[in-house]
């Protein structure tokens, strides 16, 4: 048992890996015995198993989640001249994927309560050139499948999900990865399902998209040394797939652990609402898989709710001072990143995303985070706010 006063890391994969270490080593040895390191048996097994878990027919393993977005969009026939709508409030990989597919990204703002793409703003951004929408199931919460499908059907758009943070998430009877034409997943080590290195996958029910994906990730070869497509080399390593095969059966249990941790946080945080600490709202119910648990330290109070006495940076420092590690997902919205200046966006274009980026703080979240640890995190948070108010009164 870890002592409650020890450092609480932001993510700790050891609790996940320790009990299955022998199984993992055995799986890796199995690949070495067969020697099928590229496009081997364990990859085919994992592609089938993961696609089935997503209630999808085909899975195509690639080198990382970013490639899954870039090649996945390409496999769906999206590219030059096509506008693709995506949220400004996401990890830059979503934007990089759209750009690498050759399409024109059209960013839109997010919803203040959920931090997910604002579908009203998305509808307003549709033009005759819009071909697709890339909803991001941010923090493990799905964007409403019903609303997405209504929008896509009305305007004849393709839905391509960025499900990199939402393995096995559910909403309105749908699983993440099964709403649209195809979806991208990442198996970066800290994701809900992570490899021991980089990895990604596209899942789809469309046979043609699946075939195109198999070609694109393998130099564009439909058969050996025959190149019909301009592809690349982006295959999920057989060794990583073997590791993921061992981990996949535990995913439901790990996700459940995450939602129980989130419930603990929710309960303990309620008394702090009045002090301007608000969790990102869950409108997804039990299907939220809590890749991250994110709170906001409110800087404004236009809706009459309290502003937080401490800004996000100060809160983060206070927690760090008590050996509690936190994260910020993400501190700068995509449209304000220097790398994408040429897209022509400016500060003020997406005010909700911009405010959120200043307010949000991700608390430790991983299977194995204990109740005493959660209590300590909230206690320190509470004490920091109280100490600050006391100082203000006495000054
Ligand atoms: C992690 C992530 C990606 C990229 O995945 P990689 O495997 O790191 O390339 C894309 N989109 C989102 C929302 C992510 O969180």
Image (cartoon, rainbow, N blue to C red):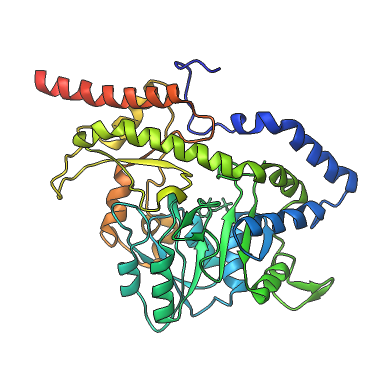
Can residue 352 be seen here?
Answer: yes
The vertical placement of 237 against 388, above or below, is below
Q: Identify which residue is drawn at 48% across, 32% down.
A: 10
Instruction: Please provide percent x and percent y for residue 64.
Output: 62, 54
Instruction: Please provide percent x and percent y for residue 361.
Output: 36, 39
Q: Tell which of 332 and 215 is nearer to you.
A: 215
Toward which corner of the image does residue 246 lie, by quadrant? Answer: top right
In the image, 387: left or right of 167? left
Exactly how many numbered labels are in the figure? 0
Can residue 235 be seen here?
Answer: no
Instruction: Please provide percent x and percent y for residue 106.
Output: 40, 70
Residue extending farthest front: 173
Can you say which quadrant of the picture contains the C terminus? top left
Can you say which quadrant of the picture contains the N terminus? top right
Q: Identify which residue is drawn at 49% across, 80% down.
A: 81
In the image, 333: left or right of 190? left
Q: Tell which of 250 and 310 is nearer to you.
A: 250
Q: Tell which of 35 and 231 is nearer to you.
A: 35
The vertical placement of 139 against 386, above or below, is below
Instruction: Please provide percent x and percent y for residue 254.
Output: 56, 39
In the image, 303: left or right of 188? left
Q: Identify which residue is drawn at 67% across, 74% down.
A: 207
Toward which corner of the image does residue 78 lie, by quadrant? Answer: bottom right
The vertical placement of 162 against 382, above or below, is below
């Amino acid at each position: 048992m870890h002592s409650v006063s020890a450092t609480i890391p932001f993510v700790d994969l050891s609790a996940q890996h320790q009990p299955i270490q022998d199984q993992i080593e055995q799986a890796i040895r199995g690949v070495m015995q067969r020697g099928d390191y590229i496009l081997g048996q364990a990859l085919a097994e994992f592609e089938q198993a993961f696609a089935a878990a997503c209630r999808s027919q085909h899975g195509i393993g690639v080198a990382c989640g970013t490639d899954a977005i870039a090649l996945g969009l390409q496999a769906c026939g999206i590219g030059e001249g096509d506008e693709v709508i995506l949220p400004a409030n996401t990890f830059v990989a979503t934007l990089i994927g759209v750009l690498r597919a050759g399409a024109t990204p059209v960013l839109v703002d997010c919803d203040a309560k959920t931090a997910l793409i604002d579908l009203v703003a998305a509808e307003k951004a549709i033009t005759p050139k819009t071909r697709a929408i890339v909803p991001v199931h941010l923090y493990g919460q799905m964007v409403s499948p019903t609303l997405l499908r209504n929008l896509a059907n009305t305007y004849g758009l393709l839905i391509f999900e960025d499900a990199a943070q939402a393995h096995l998430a559910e909403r309105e009877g749908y699983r993440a990865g099964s709403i649209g034409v195809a979806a991208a997943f990442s198996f970066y080590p800290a994701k809900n399902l992570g490899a021991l290195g980089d990895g990604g996958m596209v899942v789809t029910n469309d046979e043609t998209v699946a075939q195109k994906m198999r070609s694109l990730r393998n130099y564009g070869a439909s058969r050996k040394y025959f190149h019909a497509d301009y592809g690349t080399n982006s295959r999920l390593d057989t060794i990583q797939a073997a590791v993921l095969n061992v981990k996949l059966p535990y995913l439901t249990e790990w996700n459940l652990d995450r939602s129980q941790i989130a419930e603990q946080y929710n309960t303990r945080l309620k008394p702090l609402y009045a002090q301007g600490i608000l969790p990102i709202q869950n409108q997804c119910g039990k299907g939220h898989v809590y890749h991250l648990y994110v709170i906001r330290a409110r800087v404004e109070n236009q809706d009459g709710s309290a502003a937080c006495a401490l800004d996000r940076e100060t809160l983060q420092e206070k927690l760090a001072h008590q050996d509690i590690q936190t994260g910020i997902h993400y501190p700068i919205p995509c449209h304000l990143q220097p790398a994408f200046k040429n897209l022509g966006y400016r500060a003020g274009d997406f005010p909700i995303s911009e405010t959120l980026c200043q307010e949000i703080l991700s608390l430790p979240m991983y299977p194995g985070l204990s109740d005493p640890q959660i209590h300590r995190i909230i206690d320190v948070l509470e004490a920091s706010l109280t100490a600050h108010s006391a100082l203000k009164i006495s000054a």
